[in-house]
Image (spheres, helix red, strand yellow):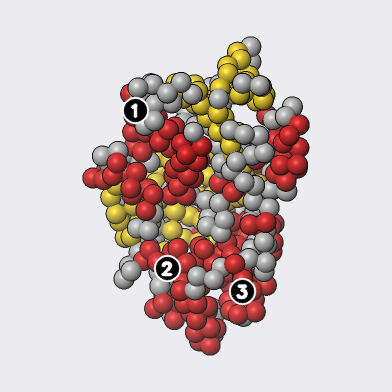
Amino acid sequence: MPNNKRIAIIGGGVTGLVTAYELSKKNYEITIYEQGSTLGGLLSGTTIENHPIERAYHHAFTTDEYTIQLTSELGLSNDLVWYPGSNAIHFNNRKYPFNGALDLLKFTPLSFFDRIRTGIVILYLSYTRSWKKLSSKTAADWLKKWSGMDAYRIIWRPLLQGKFHDYYKDVSMAWFWARIHTRANSRGKSEELGYFKSGFSTLIDSLVKSLTERNVIIKTSTPVNKITSTPSGFSITCGALIEHFDYVVCTIPTSVFARLTTGINALSDYTNQLHSITYLDAVCLIFSTPQKLSNYYWTSIHDTNIPFVVCINHTQFVPTSWFGNRQVYYLANYFPQNHPILGTSDKTLRDQWFNHLLEIYPQFDRSVVREITVTRLKNAQHIPFPSYENIVPTYATPVKNLYLSHFSQIFPEDRGVNFAIREGLKIAKTISESE
């Protein structure tokens, strides 16, 4: 039986799609607005060698309960395949395996004492659940104190810089705890990572198919210009079109939400809080080549002169047969939104990064590179400052039936597909229970 309540969902990323998917079970009239031409948000895809691939690298962990549950519900369990992960650190022109305790013990850039000390720190963070007492501290200060300066300089600082660029000194230790804690509990004897046979577009396409079958209206290439509160609910303005709704769920960056709702006076204090959230953009260079450069899936780059912070051999993880028996690589980094590299052309960025790739893999031959894609993702990562939980905005705004759900509200965990799904489930449940 149709529900006469109308719900607008602003943003067609994973959280928006899952929110719509759950609410469509209750027969609400739902419309999704997505400003881009494709759905999936940070999980959206492209193709390389005629095979789907994500614009930014993704995989699932065995502890990703929400991803696994949704995959099962959509009938995709056989499409989610688990592969062994393999990790390395590139430091001082050498690669060191870095998959567990034994590799740490063999990590000769650190003294034996510092290796033991670092191992104890990892064990502590793996097992403690007391993240709140870590929240007010910076990861930089805490790790210097307990791991020592050499371990911080060689292992931890490059990882923080790789994720947060110039803000690496300002990150809450609670966020760092969550990264270590989650990874440690996903490993067992060896870490396995999940990936869909046709990429994560499998998940997005299945969600969209279900939504279409349930008469959810999906409007891509439709940017929302304004959200207005009315006596009967809300008006959504898209160009010359104005539509009316009982509920509005915004699954968009906090800065965009603040801009769209500037005319709603009751939100002034709430949106002032949103301005304290800082974002980074991401840049990925994806290329295919017949050359196998690396035997590792994930290589963290710990030499500070290299402009990208990770080199991922996607085909060390999934079969090369998907890509015509060619190797596929990602090079990636995060940048402050005023960084000059964000304004460089794809060709300039490609040439610079390939020059540095030669420093890591001298055998790299750019003349045999087949396909190249540069992707740029805006608002790809927020900065979890110390005591970040105190500035995280609530999902329910001060205006009744207007909700905000975005990865910047996730803490202490890092944002990712699993938690994007969780947030969609949470918002849908909140709306259903408010009836």
Q: Residue at x 69, y 48 (%)?
A: 277
* Image quarter in which the N terminus is found: top left
295 displayed left or right of 386: left
Marks 2 and 3, how far apart in space?
Answer: 17 Å
Q: Is residue 166 left or right of residue 326?
A: right
- At 38% across and 63% down in the image, what residue appears? 186
| Horizontal relation, residue 169 to residue 283: left or right | right
68 or 93: nearer the viewer? 68
Which of the 4 quarters of the picture holds residue 197? top left
Task: Give coordinates of residue 398: x percent, y percent.
Answer: 67, 38
Task: Describe the element under mark 1 as helix, strand or loop.
Answer: helix
Q: To which quarter of the image does residue 142 belong? A: bottom right
* Label 2, label 1: how far apart the Cα atoms are: 35 Å
Location of mark 2 (residue): 184
What's the residue type where badge 2 is placed? Ala
Q: Mark 1 or mark 3: which is in front?
A: 1
Cα separation, mark 1 vs mark 3, equals 46 Å
User: Which of pointers 2 and 1 lies earlier in the amino acid sequence?
Assistant: 2
User: Which residue is outermost to the left?
Assistant: 78
Residue 184: image x %, image y %? 42, 68
Mark earlier in primary sequence (1, 3): 3
Does residue 274 appear anywhere in the picture? yes
* Nearest the eye: 190 or 274: 274
The residue most toward the bottom is: 113
Q: Amino acid at mark 3?
A: Leu
Q: Identify residue for label 3.
A: 143
Position of residue 35 relative to residue 186, above or below, is above
Q: Which mark is residue 209?
A: 1
